[in-house]
Image (tube, coloured by chain):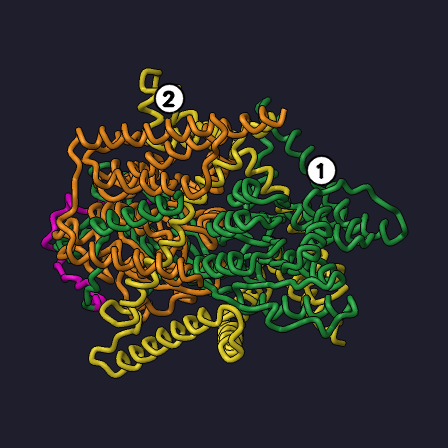
């Protein structure tokens, strides 16, 4: 009864939809032509003196610091005529290799601007600059008249490349601290020191989840997200896949890995194949266990949903980078009664996974999962080092907040440039 | 596929075709009928609430039907809800207002047709605003379909204000550089040279031949960046590279799901600078921006549907809790 | 060598990116561009691997009449149709005067994009509205304190993000209306939570990347 009722409702919905289904006519469009602005030549002696703006002053040219060279920054003091309703409409920046010229235009800046960055200089070559204040009247993009005043010549200035970006010194120190902590604990672990790592529910359940699929005689589905191999989340996911595939192979349970990217397919196939070999079951591996579906986000979601509904896996892993399709997959998995273990470092998708999945690896737990599942002391040591780094940053944040609250400006130390 | 399911699909398609070819003109409810419909919907909720209280819990399909009906019905109703402007949307609008005519705005369209219902209205409003205020728009996309969505915005602006079709010239007032693969690496390379990433525009015109791009070599020659994004690559990447490294002032429009990720970037950092000046979040953000730019269009219309849907979800959260406590009581 | 070569490449690539971030002097400043260009080229070629794999598996399903072989026929027909129209319009566009692209409005490829792909894509995204409702109905239950707080936050944000919330609290002063509560929850509570998760993720990223660069993490290559 409920089904029939629902079917009638759905038919009504479709009918109502029709009234507002927009037609989408394909309109052939002309290709736009790249118009060129024609400059009208207006003899300067026909323009009255009161239309000429005062020129900007105090032109300074300096090398852009902490770069690869090739950039100079030109700064100036505003023209006195640069104000609301004033004569200055824009500034033109001119450049030459000689103080006497000839000067060529290299850029423009809007009214009120006091600097311009010239990114087309050559390293080691001297340049001279002038800044022109420009007043004009335009119609339909064409000049009716122009009146300009040039500043004095500034320079010479030379752009150079630097060997270290001192703007990023704070990041360099931060990385040294963090990587140092990680390496220290890895070395300590290699020497036999053991560390306490708290239990993560999702990772603890992996074996149980695979066991459930074995008992029910249904497959496991592992979805590694929709990003490519250049995303660390996908790398982490493929790493976890290796561990999960090994457990599945030992239990003689089929694991299917539908992927969204070709390179992920190639990598995941090798990982699963190797896992089966290590478990002593190389014959059980079939190439079509790891298959490419589509790059398209919602096409992938539709395909995954279809596979879930038809194959009815007992266990689903949704681990990797997900976007809007996350809830579509998770809810479908929930509706078929599968146990779902998810993990992502996309903060926007975490609430959906937490609502729809049985276990969720939140953020850094995803990156810790591989170390956790491997039980390798070196990898567990790296988790400890990561925690120490986190503690250092937490203390730094607390100290920074307290100092800033008392008016001691320390934010510059933490600025990322 | 089961016979029953196939039959149901065939019946639905036939009904669809029947209504399409023989349907009368679209129906509009009068205010009285709208109120009656809302009352009927509310009574249906009360019925579900009573059944839940009696221990007869509803299934997912009932939830879907209610959501579907609540999304559709507002299209037939003739009233709209008042739209209040949030500070995040106001910031974007104020930043655009401060740009003098002639300012160059880099607009990156990083979404696909799936997200178009949510992002296209705000993109249309932005494009119309930009053209009417003399801003020069450099269009690009990090998603393959982005430039096509941008083109739809341009056409929508022309359709709404036909005068723009004559006064706005391609190449002089706006240009579409097209899509470039490489995600955040594209933004990184654009920090040095736009031309390196886009040697031609979407129509294969060489970069140097386009008047608008004459003095534009990288971000330092652009006055504002606007990003419409539905995921990755999107606002986060633009903020982390273009705004953070190259100090490009940036505003963004996101889907409601992505918007929470952008909120941390709207806080003032060192020297009072925000990484992200403002954000148009979801349909509500689009409707607010339409109100500010005086263009009451799709987002404002869709917001009524969204409001209905939100109310339905809240009702089901309440009903779900009633079911939970009922179950708990039964177990005890 | 089978293991050492990929590990060496991973090490060199990782170190190159780190160096490029801190040393702007040429040629280090070009490392990122070189690697990103190569990645784009490899990714573009790799798509054929996936597409051919999809076709192969679909054909095998049809030939062996495996489960869902009807879906496999649909995949192949769709693939062939779009490929055909893409090439056909591309060829037509090359020889037309003036030339046009296969993607330009007015072409059959564009018709398929606008009238088939776009509605299908939007339909899948629209499913989210229904799934959010069913997930909320099932998950937002006041089981404990944390779940109750989550429930209340969802309540305020859902109402505050649409005008209905302000209509309900219209009798309160402006700063106490529902949209302001929703903004406060998003700007303060949500931002704090997001930042905490993002900091943790960043640290996890560094740790994982370091393990991969140093060759400690090898599972992604297949095996320990």
Q: Looking at the colours in the rendered structure, which chain would you say is drawn in green?
A: A
**Element type where label 1 sits in the image:** helix
- Separation (CA) of disc 2 from disc 1: 40 Å
Q: Position of residue C207 (x, y in %)?
A: 69, 51
Q: Is residue B232 above or below residue B37?
A: below
Q: Nearer the viewer, residue B76 or A153?
A: B76
State how many labels appear. 2
> Residue A331 got which mark?
none
Q: Residue at x 76, y 50 (%)?
A: A382
Rendered view: B121 above or below B109: above
Q: Which residue is mark 2?
A: C177
Q: Which chain letter matches label 1?
A: A
Left or right of A362? Residue C184 is: left
Q: Is residue A175 magenta?
A: no
Which chain is assigned orange? Answer: B
Local packing at callout 2 (Cα closer than 10 Å; few below 14, some 14-19, many 20+) is some
Q: Position of residue A299 (x, y in %)?
A: 44, 61
Please identify the residue farthest to the right as the structure is shown.
A192
What crowding class fits label 1: few (fewer than 14 Cα within 10 Å), some (14-19), or many (20 or more)? Answer: some
Most foreground residue, B183 or B167 = B183
User: Which mark, residue A392?
Assistant: 1
Would you identify the image quadrant in which residue C120 lies?
Answer: bottom left
Mark 2: secondary structure: loop
Residue reaching furthest to the left: A46
Of discs 2 and 1, which sits in the foreground? Answer: 2
- The region drawn magenta spans A31-57
Write down which chain is painted yellow: C
> In the image, what residue occupies the spot 48% across and 29% down?
C185
């Amino acid at each position: 009864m409920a089904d029939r009722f629902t079917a009638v409702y759905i038919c009504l919905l479709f009918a109502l939809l029709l009234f507002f289904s927009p037609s989408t006519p394909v309109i052939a469009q002309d290709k736009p032509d790249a118009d060129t602005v024609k400059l009208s030549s207006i003899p300067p002696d026909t323009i009255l003196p009161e239309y000429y703006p005062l020129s900007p002053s105090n032109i300074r040219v300096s090398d852009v610091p902490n770069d690869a060279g090739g950039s100079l920054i030109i700064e100036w003091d505003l023209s006195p005529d640069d104000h609301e309703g004033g004569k200055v409409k824009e500034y033109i920046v001119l450049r030459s290799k000689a103080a006497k010229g000839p000067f060529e235009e290299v850029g423009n800046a809007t009214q009120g601007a006091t600097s311009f960055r010239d990114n087309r200089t050559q390293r080691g070559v001297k340049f001279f600059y002038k800044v022109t204040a420009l007043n004009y009247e335009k119609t339909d993009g064409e000049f009716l008249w122009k009146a300009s005043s040039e500043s004095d010549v500034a320079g010479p200035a030379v752009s150079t490349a630097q060997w270290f970006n001192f703007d990023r010194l704070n990041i360099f120190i931060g990385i040294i601290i963090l990587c140092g902590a990680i390496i220290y604990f890895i070395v300590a672990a290699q020497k036999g020191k053991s560390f306490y790592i708290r239990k993560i529910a999702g990772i603890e359940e992996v074996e149980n989840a695979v066991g459930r699929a074995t008992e029910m005689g249904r497959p496991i589905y592992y979805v590694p997200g929709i990003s490519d191999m250049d995303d660390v989340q996908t790398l982490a996911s493929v790493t976890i896949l290796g561990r999960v595939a090994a457990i599945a192979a030992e239990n003689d349970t089929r694991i299917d890995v539908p992927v969204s990217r070709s390179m992920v397919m190639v990598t995941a196939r090798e990982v699963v194949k190797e896992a089966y070999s290590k478990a002593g079951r190389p014959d059980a591996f079939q190439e079509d266990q790891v298959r490419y579906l589509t790059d398209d986000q919602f096409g992938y979601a539709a395909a995954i949903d279809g596979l879930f509904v038809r194959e009815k896996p007992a266990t689903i892993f949704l681990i990797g980078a997900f976007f809007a399709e996350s809830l579509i997959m998770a809810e479908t998995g929930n509706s078929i009664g599968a146990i779902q273990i998810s993990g992502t470092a996309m903060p926007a998708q975490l609430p959906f996974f937490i609502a729809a999945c049985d276990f969720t690896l939140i953020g850094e737990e995803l990156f810790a999962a591989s170390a956790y599942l491997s039980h390798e002391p070196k990898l567990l040591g790296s988790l400890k080092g990561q925690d120490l780094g986190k503690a250092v940053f937490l203390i730094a944040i607390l100290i920074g907040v307290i100092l800033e609250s008392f008016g001691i400006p320390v934010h510059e130390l933490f600025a990322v440039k | 596929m089961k016979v029953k399911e196939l039959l149901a699909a065939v019946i639905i398609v036939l009904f669809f075709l029947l209504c399409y070819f023989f349907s009368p003109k679209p129906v509009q409810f009068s205010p009285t009928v709208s109120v009656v419909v809302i009352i009927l919907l509310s009574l249906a909720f009360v019925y579900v609430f009573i059944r839940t209280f009696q221990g007869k819990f509803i299934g997912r399909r009932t939830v879907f039907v209610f959501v579907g009906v609540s999304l559709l019905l507002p299209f037939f109703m003739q009233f709209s809800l008042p739209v209040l402007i949030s500070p995040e949307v106001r910031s974007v609008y104020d930043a655009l207002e401060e740009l003098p005519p002639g300012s160059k705005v880099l607009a990156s369209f990083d979404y696909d047709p799936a997200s178009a219902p949510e992002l296209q209205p705000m993109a249309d409003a932005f494009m119309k605003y930009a053209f009417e205020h003399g801003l020069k728009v450099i269009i690009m996309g990090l998603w393959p379909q982005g430039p096509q969505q941008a083109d739809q915005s341009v056409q929508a602006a022309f359709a709404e204000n036909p005068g723009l079709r004559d006064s706005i010239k391609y190449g002089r007032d706006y240009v579409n550089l097209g899509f470039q693969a490489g995600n955040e690496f594209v933004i990184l390379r654009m920090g040095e040279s736009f031309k390196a990433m886009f040697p031609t525009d979407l129509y294969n015109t060489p970069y140097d031949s386009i008047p608008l791009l004459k003095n534009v070599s990288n971000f330092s020659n652009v006055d504002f960046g606007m990003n419409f994004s539905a995921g990755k690559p999107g606002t986060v990447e633009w903020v982390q590279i273009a705004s953070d490294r190259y100090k490009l002032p940036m505003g963004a429009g996101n889907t409601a799901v992505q918007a929470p990720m952008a909120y941390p970037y709207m806080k003032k950092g060192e020297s009072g600078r925000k990484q992200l000046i403002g954000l148009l979040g979801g349909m509500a953000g689009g409707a607010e921006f339409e109100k500010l730019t005086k263009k009451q269009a799709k987002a404002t219309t869709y917001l009524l549907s969204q409001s209905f849907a939100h109310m339905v979800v809240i009702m089901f959260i309440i009903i779900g809790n009633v079911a939970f406590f009922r179950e708990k009581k039964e177990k005890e | 060598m089978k293991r050492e070569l990929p590990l060496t490449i991973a090490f060199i690539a990782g170190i190159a990116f780190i160096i490029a971030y801190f040393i702007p002097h040429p040629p280090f400043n070009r490392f990122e561009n070189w690697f990103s260009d190569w990645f784009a080229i490899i990714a573009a070629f790799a798509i054929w691997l996936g597409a051919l794999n999809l076709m192969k598996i679909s054909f095998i399903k049809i030939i062996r009449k495996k489960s869902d072989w009807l879906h496999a026929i649909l995949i192949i027909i769709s693939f062939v149709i779009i490929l055909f129209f893409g090439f056909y319009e591309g060829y037509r566009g090359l020889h037309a005067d003036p030339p046009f692209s296969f993607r330009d409005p007015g072409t059959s490829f564009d018709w398929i994009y606008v009238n088939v792909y776009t509605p299908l894509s939007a339909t899948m995204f629209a499913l989210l509205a229904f799934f959010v409702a069913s997930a909320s109905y099932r998950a937002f239950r006041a089981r404990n304190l944390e779940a109750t707080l989550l429930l209340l936050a969802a309540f305020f944000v859902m109402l505050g993000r649409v005008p209905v919330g302000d209509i309900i609290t219209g009798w309160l002063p402006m700063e106490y209306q529902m949209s302001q509560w929703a903004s406060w929850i998003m700007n303060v509570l949500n931002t704090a939570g997001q930042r905490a998760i993002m900091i943790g993720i960043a640290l996890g990223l560094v740790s994982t990347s370091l393990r991969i660069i140093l060759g400690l993490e090898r599972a992604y290559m297949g095996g320990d």
